[in-house]
Image (tube, rainbow, N blue to C red):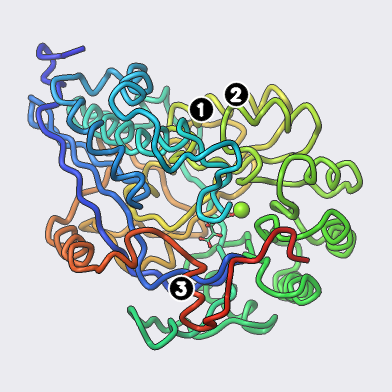
Amino acid sequence: MTDSKHGLTITEVRLTPILVADPPLLNTQGVHQPYTPRLIIELITEGGATGLGETYGDTKYLDLARPLAAALIGRSVTDLNGLPALAAEVCGDSPAATGADAVDVGGLRGVQTADKLRLSVLSGFEVACLDAWGRATGLPVHALLGGKVRDRVEYSAYLFYRWAEHPGGRGERDDWGAALDPAGVVAQARRFADTYGFTSFKLKGGVFEPAQEVAAVKALAAAFPGQPLRLDPNGAWTVATSLTVADQLRGVLEYLEDPASGTDRMAEVAAATPLPLATNMCVTTFDEIAGAFTRGAVQVVLCDHHYWGGLRNTRELAAVCRTFGVGLSMHSNTHLGISLAAMTQVAATVPHLDHACDSHYPWQTEDVLTERLTFRDGGLDVGDAPGLGVELDHERLATLHRRWLADDGSHRDRDDAAAMRLADPHWTAPTVPRW
Ligand SMILES: O=C([O-])C(=O)C[C@H](O)[C@@H](O)C(=O)[O-]
Ligand SMILES: [Mg+2]
């Protein structure tokens, strides 16, 4: 559908893959690489409005983004309901979706289906369309989604066990230092609280023996009494271990995130503990909802608008969660300010967003915006500027793109286990459950 009358027809789409500095954050798969891929999308309309979008930048996403970008020329930015069919038609099934058991990034992003890969790409275009549409009409994205129900969106501090620097001193060095024990985790949390005002804390677990991680959470509870805490070992534990930890941290945690992997194990854990379970692993597609919700396997879904297919699908997910009495919050992977602005816009429109959203953003020292988004008192204000309310810094984008061009391919696809092998040549991503 074109829209010449309003100047909303897309005349140009620019795709810019970039590599962004990432600190040595540890998880159950390994460690983050020094640079991580993202894809930045710019849409231009007939009327001269530009729209920005951002999504995962690994090769399998870029391969789908290129045909979709070409197919969008001549269509209206308002034609959002047509995007899934268009993507299915022009992108087809990614060869990376290799069967029912395929997972993304060793399982950290849940299942990997052809549909989900297309949705992850499409989400960046949907956000860019909404941004362009908003800029063309002077309306913020939240208005195009039906209007905001809150003026601020709360975020949590995303704590990671981490090294001071990447193996061999590769990449960029920051001044956070190492955090490998309870004292290190508390110090990191203190800095997050002092700098950004966060009052909720999530610790990425699955790195050390569960008892060590329980000790770290207890140290957090002592340092920040009464403040919401979460622990997320990315499905690394058995059902028995999950229940032991749930018992030890009952009354301490706000929720336990993906203690065990898969809906079956999560349902077993949920049936035996009063502690709410959250997930961004066993429910990452609409197809997985019925099986998990009807069995009571999860009490909170952490939505990632990238893999759920955009901001409007996030609202659809919110409606399903509300229907089942399941809570909703937001998951985050390494992302930049365009995605953070998109998360904030949609979060502002969802009435029952029950918990502070996750965001990796504070770990990202580089961005493609002229002005970084700034957390204040643990949250972001929801502005009324047109579109997403952010501006692209073309020079920064070009610099990060040059890094992508210069890369020998070793950072173009996220691989935390490969990064770990530089420190420990015998490392293989552990089989799950690990403990
Ligand atoms: O909440 C989560 O499970 C995540 O954020 C997944 C991410 O991939 C995180 O584990 C990471 O980046 O190491
Ligand atoms: Mg998680």
Residue at screen point 71% across, 50% down: 261
Viewer-proximal residue among 201 and 431? 431
Among the two numbered marks 3 and 1 on one chain, the one whose residue lies closer to the N terminus: 1
| Spot occupied by residue 81 in the image (x, y as percentages of width and height) | 36, 17
Looking at the rendered structure, the kind of residue marked 3 is Ala
Earlier-in-chain disc, 3 versus 2: 2
Q: Which quadrant would residue 146 be assigned to in this image?
A: top left
Q: Amino acid at mark 1?
A: Arg
What's under tag 2, amino acid-wise? Ala
The CA span between labels 3 and 2 is 39 Å
Work out whether residue 328 or residue 32 is closer to the camera in this orientation and state it: 32
Q: Nearer the viewer, residue 41 or 225?
A: 41
Residue 204 vertical position relative to residue 59 in the rendered view, above or below: below
Is 168 rendered above or below residue 249?
below
Do the numbered discs 3 and 2 sit on residues whose CB atoms are within 8 Å? no
**Number of marks present in the image shown:** 3
The answer to whether residue 83 is above or below residue 270 is above
The reply to whether the C-beta atoms of the residues labelled 3 and 1 are less than 8 Å apart is: no
Residue 362: x %, y % from top left: 43, 65
Q: Which residue is mark 3?
A: 419
In space, the residues marked 3 and 1 are separated at their CA atoms by: 36 Å
- Give the labeled residue for mark 2: 319
Q: Which residue is mark 1?
A: 315
Q: Is residue 161 left or right of residue 81?
A: right
Which percent across, then down, holds residue 343? 43, 43
When the figure is inspected, residue 392 is found, relative to residue 324, above or below; the finding is below
- Quick one: SS at disc 1? helix
